[in-house]
Image (cartoon, rainbow, N blue to C red):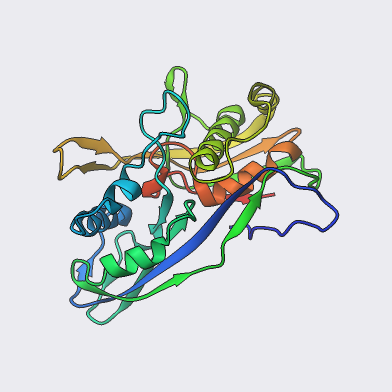
Amino acid sequence: MITPRRKAARLEWSVRLRLQVLRLSFVAQRPFTFPLPASNKLRGLIGKNLWDRGDNTYGRFFTPSQTNGPSGLSDPPRPFVLRAAHLDGLHVAEGEAFHFDLHLFDLRTPWGQVLAESLTVMAGASLRDVTAGEAFALELDGRVEDVQRVRVRFLTPMELKTKGGLAATPEFGILAARARDRISTLSQLYGDGPLPIDFVGFGERAARVEMTRCEIQRVEAERRSGRTGQTHSLGGFVGEAEYAGALTEFLPYLRAAQWTGVGRQTSWGKGAIALQE
C-alpha cells in the first residue's frame, strides 16, 4: 500500500478526508481457526460486544444516522473500515498473538477508548493492546505528478454498482466514480462536508481512461445474520487491472481509496485495493 504523502508547503489544498488507523491486538486463550473471511467473524463479535454495552454505541458504530447525509441514502457508510484479510483461515495457537486494524473516519468520538472498554474479552481471546495512530489527512486536490498508467490490485472481493446492477469488470469510469462517491459521502457524514467538485465532469473524464489489461476472478462467500436470519453475499471479484490515459486527476482518489475501500460492504473488509503507479 502506498504511504499517504504529506503536502508540499507551496501547495494549497482544500479537499481532504481525515482518518485514523486503530490496531487492536489480542492473545488467544485457546486454539482456534479464523473462518473465510475472518472479517465476518470479527464483525459479529464486535457487534455483540458493543450491543451488550446497553447504550447507543452500537447504533452509532454499526447503524449510523444519516441526518446530515446525502438525500436518498438508505444505508449510510459506517465510520470505519475493517482490515483483517491477513487472518483469513489462520490457525491461532493458545497464547499466540494476533491483530486486526480499523480505519476510522469519525474523529469526533474516541473510538479507541470505546473499543478498549468493550472488547476486553472476545470469543476465546483477550485484548492485549489498542494502538491509535496519529490522525492524518488524505489530500484530494492540488498539483500531483503526471501519471499515464496505473495498476490496481483488488485484494479482497469487490462489487461495483452501476445503473444496470453490478459491474462485470472494473472499468475505470465505474471504479473512479465509486471511489469518488464513497469519499464524498464519508466526508459529508464525518468530515468537512461533501467534496466541492464537478461530479459530472469527473465521471465523464474518468470514462475516457482505457482499461488495458484485466485479470480478475469471482470469489463466492456469504454470511447469515444472527439478528435477522437473512443471508448476505460477501463475494466479489479479486485480481488486478491496468489502466492508461489522463490519470493525473484521479490519482489522489485512488490513493485515498486504499484507505477507504471501494464498492459495496467496504466496512467489513471488501473492496480493499493497492495501487502501483
* Towards the viewer: 206 or 220: 206
Tell me where residue 55 sits by quadrant.
bottom left
As drawn, is 54 to the left or to the right of 214? left
Image position, residue 57 (x, y; %): 29, 53
Q: Is residue 232 above or below residue 154?
A: above
List the single residue furthest toward the right: 10
List the single residue furthest toward the bottom: 95
Regarding residue 143, the answer to whether it shows in the image is: yes
The residue that appears at 26% across and 62% down in the rendered structure is: 34
Image position, residue 187 (x, y; %): 55, 42
Quadrant in which the N terminus appears: bottom right
As drawn, is 176 to the left or to the right of 57? right
The residue that appears at 42% across and 23% down in the rendered structure is: 72
* Towards the viewer: 250 or 122: 122
As drawn, is 166 to the left or to the right of 2? left
Regarding residue 167, the answer to whether it shows in the image is: no
Image position, residue 134 (x, y; %): 56, 67
